[in-house]
Amino acid sequence: MRSMATMRDFIHYPILMALFTLISFVAMIWLIINARGVARLFARRTNDLEPGAAPRGVTASAGAVWTAIVLFVLGGFGAFLMLYLSGERDRADMIDADRAALNEPYIPPKR
């Protein structure tokens, strides 16, 4: 009987990398669409950023912009973390060429 999946088994699913990537892309697209809100958030007298006039006063709030920035960064870090951790699994599944025989079937190592 197999026990419940541990965190080590869970991090290797490619769906997690796809989910983190999707979160990062959606946040990036939202930030591009709401560029006026980003410019308003970072506008200072000493730089060249100026938020343009928004149609009918529709702009993103500062909290929404910060939330999108945090989701963008965490989504990117999460995707890279899943990519890094999946490398361990690839090394464990490689065939040992010294022990391989032409007439014997490959039996993967037990985890």
Image (cartoon, helix red, strand yellow):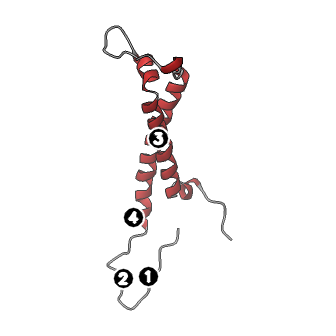
Name the residue: 39% across, 64% down: 91
Task: Look at the numbered disc 4 and give the secondary structure of its residue.
Answer: helix
Q: How far is disc 3 from disc 1 in space, using C-alphas? A: 39 Å
Marking on residue 100: 2
The reply to whether the C-beta atoms of the residues labelled 3 and 1 are less than 8 Å apart is no
Q: How far is disc 2 from disc 1 in space, using C-alphas? A: 7 Å
- Of circles 3 and 1, which is in front? 3
Q: In which quarter of the image is residue 93?
A: bottom left
- Of circles 2 and 3, which is in front? 3
- Give the x, y percent position of residue 106: 43, 82
- Give the x, y percent position of residue 66: 50, 25
The reply to whether the C-beta atoms of the residues labelled 1 and 4 are less than 8 Å apart is no
The reply to whether the C-beta atoms of the residues labelled 2 and 4 are less than 8 Å apart is no
Which residue is situated farthest in the front direction here? 56
The reply to whether the C-beta atoms of the residues labelled 2 and 1 are less than 8 Å apart is yes
Question: Which residue does the numbered mark 4 point to in the structure image?
Answer: 91
Marking on residue 88: none
User: Camera-side residue: 9 or 31?
Assistant: 31
Name the residue: 49% across, 40% down: 26
Question: Which residue does the numbered mark 3 point to in the structure image?
Answer: 24
Q: What residue type is labelled 2?
A: Ala
Residue 40, relative to residue 8: is it above or below?
above
User: Camera-side residue: 83 or 100?
Assistant: 83
Q: How far is disc 2 from disc 3 in space, using C-alphas? A: 42 Å
Task: Look at the numbered disc 1 and give the secondary structure of its residue.
Answer: loop
Q: Which amino acid does label 3 sit on?
A: Ser
Q: Which of marks 1 and 4 is nearer the N terminus?
A: 4
Q: Which of marks 2 and 1 is nearer the N terminus?
A: 2
